[in-house]
Image: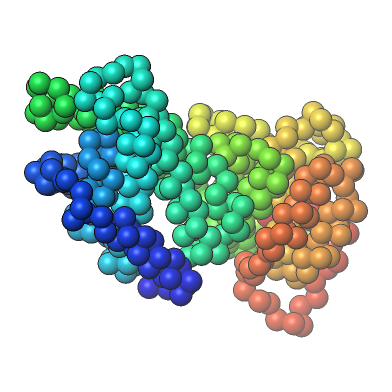
Amino acid sequence: MEATPARARAYVVCAVSGALWCLLPLPTVHTPWWAVALLAALYAGCEQVARRRFAGTFYPVLLAAAFLLPPPAAALVPLPGALFSHVEQGSPWLRRSWRAAQLALGVWAAARVHWALGGRNAVVASDFPYALVPALAAVLAFCLVLTVLDGGILALAERVPLRRAWRGLFLRSLAPIGVHGLAGLMMAVLWRSPYGPVAALLVLLPMGVSWWVFAQYHQERAAHQATIRALVQAVDIKDGYTRGHSERVGQASMMIARELGMDDSRVEVLRFAGILHDVGKLGVPTRLLRKDGPLTPEERRVIELHPEYGHEMVRGIGFLGEARAAVLHHHERLDGSGYPYGLLGSQIPESARVVAVADAFDAMTSTRSYRRARPVSAALEELSRCAGTQFDPLMVRALVRALGRCGWHPAVTADEVQSSIAFPPSPTVSSGMRG
């Protein structure tokens, strides 16, 4: 976080100030310090295990604190675990201060809402189902505070547009935090029962098992990412002229998918589709991929086999879903003159129509061995000209809108060639098929 912008640092300072303000009433509040110390130590230990062995943050102890303690005391519980957590990169104390302040504010808000709705009495009396109402409200408050703060730091530190920074954050975090909230409520009820804190600790055992299952999912997801990276690196090594092209097509495909309002899981699949669309080039002779100048008809037919090669390579990778169809059909055209099967209009899978536009756009805005890059405006004009015959007009318009809002910074993917070499004109967008 060394390169953190000044405004993001100021945001962290404001969050820390807010957390300190939440702690100010501590001297006037009856605080069971032994309970604060026990919960803080328990959270710190669980957090260390969760960070090193699993993934994410272990919230049940924090929410149990919100259900058991006065708001200022509850806000103390996350501080030791956050302030002494392991930080792999960036400015450790800036990151630790941010995390401590964020969690302290979230727990304080949850405790405040829970106590305002009479949750403390409901927990002491084990008053079900009414005890669920203030607990649910507290979970919503906790989730909302974390969402607002996360979106704000994302927008300020990474310059992500505010709308995109907050989009989907609350809903994505609500389900896992809700499960943690139920575990925290069970801990609080058992804590207040005749069995005491020891019984409350037993709740952590099933939560640990569920956390392990969650970690396996994340490890599988990391393996998927590693598989994709390995395939893309192999393509980049084979075809040095288009190095970085796959990642940019994945980014453009994601921009189109988001503009079309697709859900996050499908956006990710479209990103995979864009990244892997040219994986079939591993089956094409390297001399053709690196050839300077136009291809002969025979050479073109060989290169036109790469979508089928790519589909054969990825069809057994189940997590790719509709991305496999995009790999096979991203060179089809709406008028039926594309390849490999000459599909018409809506016969072409939607994922393939997205990737086709993203692929052509990046091909035109990148310098290749056989032609120079075009300006973004010229590439968009060409895409619009070919909309309805080669490209889906809906996808073209989505890309135009996304670029108008977010911009695009095309990278040169090949070494600049000597100016004395003549670049043959490209009569159609399909000349980008080598990328």
Q: Nearer the viewer, residue 299 or 388?
A: 388
Coordinates of residue 265 in the picture (x, y in percent): 55, 36
Side (left or right) of 220 relative to 262: left
Residue at x-position 22% and y-position 40%: 69
Residue at x-position 81% and y-position 49%: 397
- Residue reaching furthest to the top: 128
Residue at x-position 87% and y-position 53%: 384
Residue at x-position 81% and y-position 42%: 394
Q: How many discs mark residues in the rendered view? A: 0
Quarter the N terminus occupies? bottom left
Coordinates of residue 280 in the picture (x, y in percent): 60, 43
Coordinates of residue 199 in the picture (x, y in percent): 12, 24
Q: Nearer the viewer, residue 88 or 308?
A: 88
Side (left or right) of 93 relative to 231: left
Any part of residue 50 in sight: no
- For the rendered model, the colour scheme is rainbow
Q: Nearer the viewer, residue 388 or 282?
A: 388
Coordinates of residue 309 in the picture (x, y in percent): 61, 38
Locate residue 49: give its quadrant: top left
Q: Is residue 161 above or below residue 194?
A: below
Q: Is residue 422 above or below residue 265?
A: below
Quarter the C terminus occupies? bottom right
Q: Is residue 392 above or below residue 368?
A: above
Any part of residue 332 in sight: yes
